[in-house]
Every structure is written in structure tokens, then in C-alpha cells.
Image (cartoon, rainbow, N blue to C red):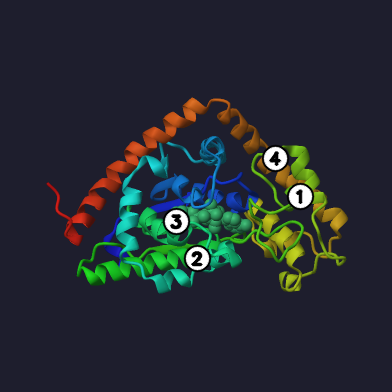
């Protein structure tokens, strides 16, 4: 079904809190890997961020931080389209159409909403509930065929497929592609450094449980050296990491940072103690991440330049999105003058 569509990548990151190693390995590093292989469109999804309260000044800084993270990691604004979502109003407009396509029952099954709303579901914003339909609009506004994301976004991309299929069916139009989530590599779910059963996230209680993309070399090394582990040394084979979430997480982070498989990491460090492996991981992480965090800080010293890059990207994004939105309105029967 997607074969009639030009291959195009779309993905995005919310500017809420800082970027983490989870965002880098699960998303940004993979975005860079797809650049040059097909058309790539990467967004800072600020309208998603405001589904929970954001301080306005901090939101602007966080938006620039995600853009700086993209560029520092190797996304080139001349090769990829880089922009922030709110500058292309077609996202909100298609989001509304999809609110009228998606079913309440589908939204009720979204596990991320249930986790975020918890026992407070009556008090969260309507936007948080409708969020997956805006995410479908982000993707389908570009007729994107490939969406690289971490494991936690899989259900939202599947919902995007359901929305596309229902739209195509209801309007008897083969218009939207049935998009593939791209969830590959060793780090599609980077875990918390203090509790290997929880995802590494921007919002965890302690800063020691995550690596931030803006952490300097000392912090990165310290956090890996203090990361929780179990008392056993590394196993002789990858299978030996089963039921050892903290150990497995550190091996997978090493693998992802060094572009190797976790099996190859174990083959390099069979039976190694933590006194050997943790310093090796800390050195590797500092070598890979510290230059990026330095570059992010340098870029963020010139916010006007970041703003110009995002504005130019938004112009290019609009050129793809606007005709697709207009065609959608026409298919739906919304009269245009
Ligand atoms: P967000 O901002 O929470 O996360 C951005 C990307 O980072 C990935 N990620 C992780 N990957 C591995 N391990 C982790 N610990 C980890 N934490 C985060 C996420 O899977 C994601 O790929 N709804 C999305 C943003 C979005 C979007 C889109 C994505 C809006 N529209 C359209 C793709 C296409 C979100 O909140 O991601």
C-alpha cells in the first residue's frame, strides 16, 4: 500500500524538559542514520509539549535545545527539513480532521495516556487525550512512509495506521500511506540507570537516573560509574543477560554508542567485572557524547541562528504539507473558495 508513495521519513521530539540519552539513542542517532537515504523531515513537536503545562519562556528554550541536539548530533538543515511544529499550522488543521476520524475507543486503549493520566484522568487536558491523533497528523501530513521511533511510541504509530486506513476507507480514497514504524537497533528502549525496569525519561525524580544530552564529560562519567548493577560479572553469552535488566541496559547502551551488536559487546568483555566494564562504558560515552553536548551549548549561545534555521525549515515543510492538507479538505468535502 505504501509503494505508491515516495519514501519519506518523518519523526519528532517533544521539547519538554531536556533531551536524554534515550532520545539520542532511540531517536536522534537513528534519524542521522536515515539522512541521505531518503527525504527526511524532523520536527520539534512543540504543540505536543503543551498538552501538559509548560512555562512559556522554558518552552522556547527547550524548543531551541531540541533543534540544537538535532544539529549537534549530525542532522544537517540542508539535507533534512528541521522545523518546529507550531510554525506549520497544517498540523493542527489535519489534527482536527483526524479527531473526527479516530474513535474514542481507540484513544482509550493508549497505554501512554493511561500512564501519564494515572488516577488523575478527569483533570488532564483534552489535548493530552487527543495527542495521538495530532501525532498521526504530523506523520500523514507529509505522506511519510517511515517513522523512526523508540519502542514507547509503537502504539501511537499503529494508531496512525488505523487512522489512515479508516480515512481511506470512509472516503473511498487511497490517499494516506499505511506508515511503517521503524524500531530497530540495540537501544529502542534505554532504561533508567537506577532502576533497569523503568524507561529512562526526562521527568524521572533523580538526575542520576538519566544522562542528559547537555551533561558535561564529568557528569557523564560519574553517572555511568554510579549506575546500579547486580553483583554478578558480565556473562559469557548475550543470553546470560536475561533477567538482569540493569546489566543488559548498560551492555545495550555500549552497543548503541559504538555501533555494534550487544552480542559483540559480550564477546569483547566475556565475564568482565563491573570494575572493568563501567570505566570502559564511561570512557566510550564521554568520547561520543561530550563533543555533542559542547556543540549543543555553542549552538544555543546563538538562539537567533537556531530560530532562522527552524523558520527556513518550516517554509520547506509547508511546501510539502499545504497541498496534502488542501487535498484532504477537498476529499472531506470542505468547500474552498
Ligand atoms: P518523545 O518526545 O517522548 O520522545 C522522542 C523520541 O525519543 C524516543 N525515546 C526513547 N527511545 C529509547 N529509549 C528511551 N528511554 C526513550 N525515551 C524517548 C521516543 O520513542 C521518541 O521516538 N509522541 C512523540 C513525539 C511525536 C512524534 C510525532 C514522533 C509527535 N509526533 C510523529 C514520531 C512521529 C513523543 O512524545 O516522543
CA gap, disc 3 and disc 4: 31 Å
Q: In percent of the image, x 52 and y 38: which residue is there?
A: 56
Q: Earlier in the sequence, mark 3 or mark 4?
A: 3
Mark 4 — residue? 215
- Circle 1 or circle 2, nearest the eye: 1
Q: Residue furthest front?
A: 122
Does any portion of residue 258 appear in the rendered image?
Answer: no
CA gap, disc 4 and disc 2: 28 Å
- Circle 3 or circle 4, nearest the eye: 3
Q: Is residue 331 left or right of residue 118?
A: left
What kind of element bears circle 3?
A: helix
330 or 267, which lies in front?
330
Discs 3, 1 touching: Cβ within 8 Å: no
Mark 2 — residue? 154
What x and y, as percent, mark residue 165?
31, 70
In the rendered image, which quarter contains the N terminus?
A: bottom left
What x and y, as percent, mark residue 16?
56, 46
Q: Is residue 102 left or right of residue 323?
A: right
What kind of element bears circle 1?
A: helix
Mark 1 — residue? 208
Discs 1, 4 touching: Cβ within 8 Å: no
CA gap, disc 3 and disc 1: 31 Å
- Circle 3 or circle 1, nearest the eye: 3
Does any portion of residue 195 appear in the rendered image?
Answer: yes
Vertical side of 173 occupied by 91: above or below: above
Vertical side of 271 occupied by 76: above or below: above
Which class describes the residues within 10 Å of circle 3: few (<14), some (14-19), or many (20+)?
some
Discs 3, 4 touching: Cβ within 8 Å: no
CA gap, disc 1 and disc 4: 11 Å
Mark 3 — residue? 127
Vertical side of 132 occupied by 39: above or below: above
Amino acid at each position: 500500500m505504501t509503494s505508491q508513495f515516495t519514501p519519506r521519513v518523518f519523526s519528532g521530539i517533544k521539547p519538554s524538559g531536556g533531551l536524554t540519552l534515550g532520545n539520542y539513542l532511540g531517536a536522534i542517532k537513528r534519524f542521522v542514520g536515515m539522512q541521505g537515504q531518503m527525504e527526511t523531515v524532523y520536527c520539534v513537536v512543540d504543540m505536543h509539549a503543551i498538552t501538559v503545562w509548560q512555562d512559556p519562556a522554558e518552552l522556547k528554550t527547550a524548543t531551541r535545545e531540541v533543534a540544537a541536539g538535532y544539529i549537534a548530533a549530525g542532522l544537517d538543515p540542508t539535507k533534512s527539513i528541521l522545523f518546529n511544529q507550531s510554525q506549520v499550522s497544517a498540523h493542527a488543521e489535519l489534527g482536527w480532521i483526524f479527531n473526527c476520524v479516530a474513535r474514542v475507543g481507540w484513544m482509550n486503549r493508549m497505554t501512554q495516556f493511561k500512564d501519564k493520566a494515572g488516577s488523575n484522568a478527569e483533570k488532564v487536558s483534552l489535548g493530552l487525550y487527543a495527542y495521538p491523533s495530532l501525532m498521526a497528523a504530523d506523520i500523514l501530513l507529509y505522506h511519510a512512509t517511515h517513522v523512526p521511533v523508540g519502542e514507547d511510541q509503537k502504539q501511537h504509530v499503529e494508531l496512525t495506521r488505523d487512522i489512515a486506513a479508516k480515512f481511506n476507507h470512509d472516503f473511498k480514497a487511497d490517499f494516506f500511506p499505511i506508515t511503517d514504524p521503524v524500531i530497530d537497533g540495540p537501544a529502542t528502549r534505554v532504561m533508567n540507570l537506577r532502576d533497569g525496569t523503568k524507561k529512562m525519561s526526562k521527568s524521572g525524580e533523580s538526575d542520576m537516573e538519566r544522562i542528559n544530552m547537555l551533561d558535561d564529560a564529568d557528569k557523564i562519567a560519574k553517572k555511568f560509574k554510579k549506575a546500579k548493577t547486580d553483583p554478578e560479572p558480565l556473562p559469557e553469552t548475550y543470553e546470560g543477560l536475561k533477567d538482569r535488566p540493569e546489566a543488559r541496559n548498560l551492555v545495550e547502551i555500549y552497543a548503541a554508542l559504538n555501533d555494534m551488536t550487544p552480542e559483540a559487546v559480550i564477546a569483547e568483555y566475556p565475564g568482565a567485572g563491573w570494575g572493568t566494564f563501567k570505566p570502559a562504558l564511561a570512557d566510550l560515552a564521554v568520547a561520543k557524547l561530550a563533543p555533542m553536548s559542547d556543540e549543543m551549548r555553542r549552538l544555543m549561545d546563538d538562539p537567533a541562528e537556531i530560530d532562522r534555521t527552524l523558520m527556513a525549515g518550516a517554509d520547506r515543510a509547508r511546501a510539502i504539507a499545504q497541498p496534502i492538507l488542501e487535498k484532504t479538505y477537498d476529499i472531506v468535502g470542505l468547500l474552498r473558495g
